[in-house]
Every structure is written in structure tokens, then in C-alpha cells.
Image (cartoon, rainbow, N blue to C red):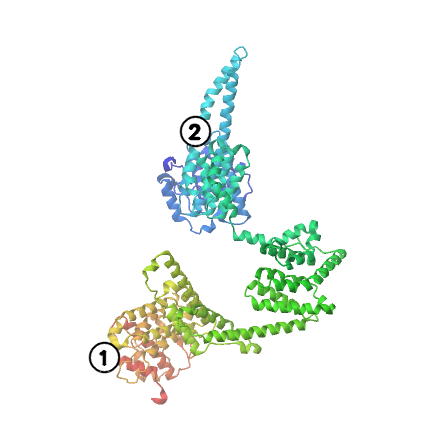
Amino acid sequence: MLVAGHLDQVCVQEGSPATAGDLYEALRSGRSAMVTVVDEWLESYKQDKEAGLLELMNFVVQCCGCKGFVTKEMFDSMENVEIISRLTKDFNEDCSGYPLSSTGPQWRRFRTCLCEFLQLLVRRCQNSLLYDDYLFSSLLALLTGLSDSQVRAFRHTSTLMAMKLMTALVEVAMDVSTQVETTQRRYKAEMCKEVELRAQERLEKLHTSYTQPIFDLQDQQEELQSMMNTVFKGIFVHRYRDLVPEIRVICMEEIGVWLQKNPSVFLNDGYLKYLGWTLHDKQGVVRQQCVRSLKALYREKDFAGRLELFTSRFKERMLSMIQDKVNDVAQEFHEHAMYLVDSLWDCAGKELRDWETMTSMLLQEKGQNWGLKDEEEGALIEVMICAVRQAAESHPPVSRAPAKRVLRVKDQKAQEQQRNRLTNHFIIVLPQLMAKYSADAEKVTSLLKAPLHFNLETYSSNSRLEKYLDLLLVQLCGIVEKHQDDEVLRACALVACALCAERYSFSARAEMSISQLLDRLVDQFTSGLTDVLQVKLSHRLLCPFSKAFLLLCDLLLVYSSSLVQGNTALQTLACPPSVSLRAEMSSFLLDYVFTEPENDPQDDDEEGEFAKIAVLQRCRNQLAGYCKLVIYGVLDLSAASDVFKHYSKFYKDYGDIMKETLSKSKIVSPILSAKTVCLSLQQLYSQLPWEQGEERVRFSQEFREMRELARHLAMTFGVNLHQSVRLALFPMARDGIQFAFQGAKDADKIPHNLLFLETLSEFSFKLLHQDRSVPRKKDSQWLESSSIASLATPPLTSTTLKGALPQTSVPRVDRAGSLAASDEEGASEPESLKDFMERCALIFSLHLSELFSSVNILDGMYCKIFSVNIYRIVFYDPANS
């Protein structure tokens, strides 16, 4: 049995799960009647209890969104804890995908059907299976184990199912209590009759029918009370303070139902205290559910006496919740002024259109005992502007009406009259209101909406009103110069666009005012910028260098060469970065991004951790801004070398950014991306401490880190050695080899950069064996007598250092950097001697670079021979031979 957490045996086929798909699909589709679904499952359960229970268990697991299932072997040999542990391993940790957390009408219907299924299951079993000490005790044991799981889907689903089962059990317990009371009352009523009036046969029959049923009902009460205690103490007490707010809401919702349905058992301080404690919950949705549950209790007058102790204990908290302020609610209330005006428009439209009274109240000077308060002025302005919109448009706000209705001719005339009336009034008054409230961003933003509803032709039709247009423009320009708030400036821009429309005769006057405003703003900006740039800050922390770098990246991106796009008028706006600026930006990354954090003991506390996270996020933003410039072509792709050379060392902090940059650079140009990788390695190679000697450098930590970086960068080219990867690696290898023999003037002296071939060898595994071979041409007769012909021998190894290259015919790399056709593909044109020798040097050096990782030949005599020959091949020029 499942009692004490052990599963009994089930007679199903070995290794196969009990299918719960029918139950789950019936609930998910919602097309089947739940009564029919419950009855069909109960019928199958009565035929085979073990198989039916296993099917119900798998149904619970499937409702949790788990792909696993409980097999017959697991059912036989494992306890609940072990089964849940196995299911947790098989569970997909994408908690956003389980049914209860999914959105959409289908999943909302699934939740409703699941709750109905559980309640009907209890109802159908209330006279028999509910007390068989097997089905529900086993089900509750499984739900208790799932509710304690670390997987959110298990906890959420099992808690909902357990709480709904508890609610159904409470209802059944109420019915059983009613039956007990009814039977006892009938028996006592018969016993209270006089002896002469007693019906002896009826009394004996009642006594016979009472004793056994009353005992059965009392046993049922004890069994129900035991199951309810299991749910409450095993699940509710732990989950009402769960980390997930949705689970806490379920607990508070259901305990409110229990308190209301069975007050004789639950309406006491032992259960009410959970509602009181949760009134302090951090999540508003949980507190709201507590208030709803308490509201239903306080609505019942019969509960007043039982709630007295609870009320006195949590009165202060309930009163303090009145003052709770939720910003979203406050904002929603602020935006509902238009709906208030629309609701009052039919019954109080005359008052709402009394523009003279409203504006006179706003223009009235404040006194000690008269005048509007600041918040009252804001509310009046908001209502007035909403009334202006309603009068000018004659349409309700959004979602108040299904669609904009077509106005009749009579209604259109009335609307036009109202619009002209408010225009004639506000044209004169609005400049005064704007002058009074110009310093208040919220009030002036509302006032600036009024001109958008004016009949602006009025300015042209009446010459006496032109001066008010000038006053409006003066106030508009003054507000732009005074405020920095985005909402205020956006409102000013909308008014300016409306006044400058070409269909109005006064648009030229408005455009002149706006143009003068722009000139003043440019002059103020230039003057202020000059003053700022001339100030020399004594401490670098006083300078917002981080914000300046981000702004610089954005400006370079906005004013890049791509801005022109063939439009010559925009040519002067393009601002490509200069060489010195590129160098400064590269130095900035080295100084402020790619730096090791200082270990400060004070940073170990919580504030120090938050500070570190903030600094890291700032550095990530700076690096991302620089990488954007590279990807979008503002900086040359070679500028990414300043990023790639820190790929390994700072992978933990910036690995995702550098990896994405490397990936995007390959899309822009695979060859240039590979060359940039080689350039970053060359820069690191040049920074090695060569004053210590080549031998010490080769075994130094810096050299090992450089080789590790090369290995990591080589892995970014992927594992598929397709043609595009090899095509990019050939120019990279050529650049690396040329760098290795750079400055080799003396043929008898080892080149200074020859050790770079060891680093280059980390990329050699990306080239196939055929890529490292020299093709033979049938018509290249001069090759047989050339000293280079000895290179066309089996591959170079540590034991055949005097050998040469294989004879396999493979694709070759031409001058354009593409693979040329091989001998077998029909190529017959002989290549030039210089091309052939450069290719021989490339292939020969790739073999040599592989040997450096396993054979120490730097001090051997073969090294001199190889370096001299390769040097002569790479830099061979027939004109100077």
C-alpha cells in the first residue's frame, strides 16, 4: 500500500507505464462531460484497483508537465520519495511549459476541468471508496511528496490538486455531520414522547437503524478528519509560504472556502492566523486574495463573534493596508480621467463644457483661505483637457465603444459649434495658463494637448487673434528652453508640427519662431559644450568616462558611412573615426574593461557584491558598444584583435559578447575574420618578454597562455572542415608564416619570430592532409630539376626532416584567396614559379609548425637549414635572384 510512502504491487505488463492519456486528453480538450470521465475511470478502478491507481498516478504526473511516467517496476519496488526523485531527473526543467503556467483559453479550461474532476471524484466516492483506506490515502501520499519537490511544476500542480481535494472533503464532512445530527435529533425526539404516545415498533426500528449507522457515520467522520489533517499539516502548512506567489494564492483562496463552508471546525484562531500572517506578504496579489477571503467572512453576520479575536489582533495591519500605494494602480487611476468625463458627459455635459469657470478658477490667485490646492489644480486641468477632447471629437475613449460611429449632419454641426466655441475661448486664455504653469511639467504637458483640438483656421480668419498666436509661440519656445522632461518636449513638438502645417496661412510665422528657437538651442549647446570641454578635471572619477564612451559608440554608429546610402546631401553628416580616436578607444578597453578587479576585503559584503555586479554590467555595455562598431563596419575588422586577444583570460565575464562578435565577423568576411585572429596572436607574441631570452620565453607562463588562446580560437572555427573554413585558414596561415620570418635578413641567422609557428600549429588540425601537399603538374618539367622538387616526398615528420612534401594532387590557393581546380579536375595551365614557391613555403611551414609542438629543434642545425630555405621561398623574387 501507499501508506507510509510505500507503493503496492500492480498487475500490469512488465516495463510498461499505465496509460493516463485518456484522462489527460479528456481534461485538456474539455469536450467530455466530467461526470462521464469520472464514472468511466471508477468503473475501471473497481475492476482492477492497482492498475487504476497507477493510471491515476501517471495522470497526476502528466498534469505536472512531466514527460516521465511511473512504471510497474517502479511501482513495485520504490517508495514515493524514490519515484519522485526518478521523475525529477526525467523532468524537463523548463518550468514555463507546464499546463498550469501556460496561457490561453485551452489551458484555463484545463485548470477548470482539473478542479471539477477532483471534486466529482470525491463526490462519487463519498459513500464507498473514500473510506477504503487505499485510493485516497495513496493519492494524498503522492501529492504530499510532490508538494515538497524542488521542481516548481510538481509543487504548483500537486498543491492545487490537494487543496481542491481538501475543499471537496470539507463538503463531504459537512454532509456527514448533517446526517449524524439528523439521526440523533430524530431519535431524541422519539424518546422525548410520553410512554403512551410512543410507537414501540417505530422506536425499536429507529433504535436498530440508529446504532449501527451512527457508528458508521462517526467512523466516516474520523476518516475524513484524518485525511483533512494530512492535507493541512502535510501540504498547506508548508506551501502557504512557498516562494512562488501563485502557490500562496491557491492556499489563501482555499482556506477562505474552508472557513466559510465549515465554520464550526475551521473558523477559529488556529486557522485564521494563516490569513492574518499572509496579510504581510510582499506580493500584492497574495495580499489581495487574503482580503477577498476575509471580505467573504466579514460579510456573514453570524461570524462576527468568532472573528472578534482575529480582528483585534490584525486590526492595525488591515488599517495600514488602506495606505498601501501601488504605482501601477496610481498610474491607472491617473489615466482614467477621460473615462470619468465620458461617463458624466450626458448628465453633466454643461458643467464639463463651462470653460470660463474652469479657466477662471485656474487663473485665480491663491490666498490663505481661498484658491485651489496644487493637487486640485492638477485634477481640474486633467478633467478640463479631457472635456476639450470629448467636445472636439465627439467620440468616446478607447474600448468604451465598439467602433467610431458616423455622426449625423446635425451632430456634426453641434460638434463644430462646440469646437469653435472652445477654440475662441482657449486661444485667448491658453497663453496665460501656460505662463502660470510653465514650471510644472505635469500640468503644462496637459495644457499643451489643448491646441491639438483647436480649429486653427481661427487664427487666420480673425486678425485680432494673431497676437495670441505670437504669445502661444513665445510660451511654447520658453517651455522648450526651460524643460528637459521627455513628455513635455514631445508635447511641444506635436504643437509645433500642428502650427507649422503648410495648409495654414500663418505657418511661415510659426516656422520662423521654431527656427529661431533651434538657432538659440544650438548656440546654447555649443557654448555650454565649449565650457565643459575646457574644464580640466583633477580626478578621473569626476569624469563620466563610462557614459562618454557609450555615447561615443552610439554617435559613431549613427553618423557612420552607412548613413549616407547614396544620398549626397547626408555626406557631411558622416563622421568616420580617425586613427587617433581608434587608438584611444582601444586603450580605453585595455584600461577600463580588460582589467583584473582589485581584491578589497570590504567587497565581500552584500553591498560590495552589488557594486561588483554594477561594474561588470557597465564594462559589458562598453565592450558591446565597441564590438557593434566593428560588426557594423564603423571600425575595421582588424580592430577586433584588441578584443580577441583577451578571449581566454576574460571568457568568464565577456565570453558571450566576444563569441558573438567572432561569429558575426565570420559572416561579414571569413578571411578577414581569420586574419584578425592571427593579428591578435601576433600582437600578443610581440608583447612577450624577449629580454629574458628565447628559451625562457618559450617555457614562460605568457607563452603558454598565448598557445591556450590560440587553441580556444581554433575551436571557434567549428568541427566541420568544409571548404569555407579551409578557405579562410589559408590566408591566415600565410600571414602567420610571413610574420614568423619577418625581418630575416641574414640567411644564417634564425628569424626572431620563428617561435610563432608553435602558436600557429594550433590551427593546423583544421587543414586536411591534402591541404598540406604540393600538386604535381604533368607539364611542369622544370620542377624535376628544381631544388624544390625534393619537397614533393612523403609528409614531413620528426624522423624525416630531410624529406619533403607528398605527391598527392590537391586543390591549391590562388592569388585571389580561392581554391583553384586540381590536376584531376582538368586544370592544365602551369602556375608561375613564384606562386608555386609561395605555396610550397606555406605547406612546408605548416608541417614545420606541427613539429615544434613535439620536437625541440630551435637549437638544432636543421632549424637553420629550414629557416633559410623557407625564408628564400617566401621572399623569392625572380627579378632579384
Query: In the displayed structure, does residue 173 sit left or right of residue 686?
Result: right
Q: CA distance from mark 1 to mark 2?
A: 98 Å
Give the residue displayed 64% in from the left and 60% down from the top: 363
Q: Residues within 10 Å of mark 1 (few under 14, many from 20)?
A: few
For mark 2, what is the residue?
A: 222
What's under tag 2, amino acid-wise? Answer: Glu
**Image quarter of residue 738:** bottom left
Q: Which residue is the site of mark 1?
A: 861
Residue beneath the point at 42% across and 78% down: 580
Task: Provide residue 802's location: percent of width, then percent of height.
Answer: 26, 78
Vertically, is 53 above or below 367? above
Image disc number at residue 521:
none
Q: Count up the numbered dots.
A: 2
Residue 301: x %, y % from top left: 55, 33
Q: Amino acid at mark 1?
A: Met
Q: Quadrant of residue 216?
A: top left
Residue 318 x, y percent position in the rendering: 50, 43
